[in-house]
Image (spheres, grey):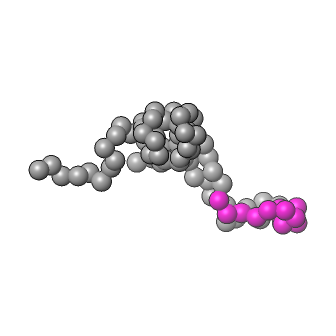
Amino acid sequence: MTESSGQHPGSEADCLRCGGPAESLGVHQFRTGGTTGGWKLLFGEWAELGEDMFPFEVRACRACGHVELRLPSSAG
C-alpha cells in the first residue's frame, strides 16, 4: 500500500469543486486589521498599527466559477 500525502488525487492546477482546470490570476496582497472610516482621518498612520498584508495566489475555474486562495509557492 502507498501512503497518502493528504492532498486530493487530482493535479494541483485542478479546481477543488469540479475538477476542471483552475487558472492562476497571480499573487495579490490582502490587507487585514487596521481601521476604517473616520479613524484614519483622525489618527492618520497611527490608525494602521494593527494592519498586516498577506500574499495569496488567486486561482479561478472558468468551468464552475469557483475562486480559491492559496499560499504562493514562493512562501512555502
The answer to which of 42 and 76 lies nearer the viewer is: 76
18 to 52, vertically: above or below: above
For the question of whether residue 58 can be seen, the reply is: no
In this picture, residue 62 sits left or right of residue 17: right
1 to 12, vertically: above or below: below
Q: Which residues are magenta?
A: 32-43
- Residue drawn 34% across and 47% down? 8
Q: Position of residue 57 (x, y in %)?
A: 53, 42
In this picture, residue 11 sits left or right of residue 5: right
Give yes or no for residue 33 being in the magenta stretch.
yes
- Residue drawn 56% across and 44% down? 67
The answer to which of 54 and 57 lies nearer the viewer is: 57
Give yes or no for residue 35 being in the magenta stretch.
yes
Q: Position of residue 62 (x, y in %)?
A: 56, 33
Q: Residue furthest left?
A: 1
For the question of whether residue 7 can be seen, the reply is: yes
In this picture, residue 51 sits left or right of residue 46: left
Query: Residue 42 appears in which quarter of the rendering?
Result: bottom right
Q: Position of residue 69 (x, y in %)?
A: 53, 48
The answer to which of 66 and 13 lies nearer the viewer is: 66
Q: Position of residue 48 (x, y in %)?
A: 73, 62
Number of numbered markers: 0
- Residue drawn 40% across and 48% down? 76
Query: Residue 32 appears in which quarter of the rendering?
Result: bottom right
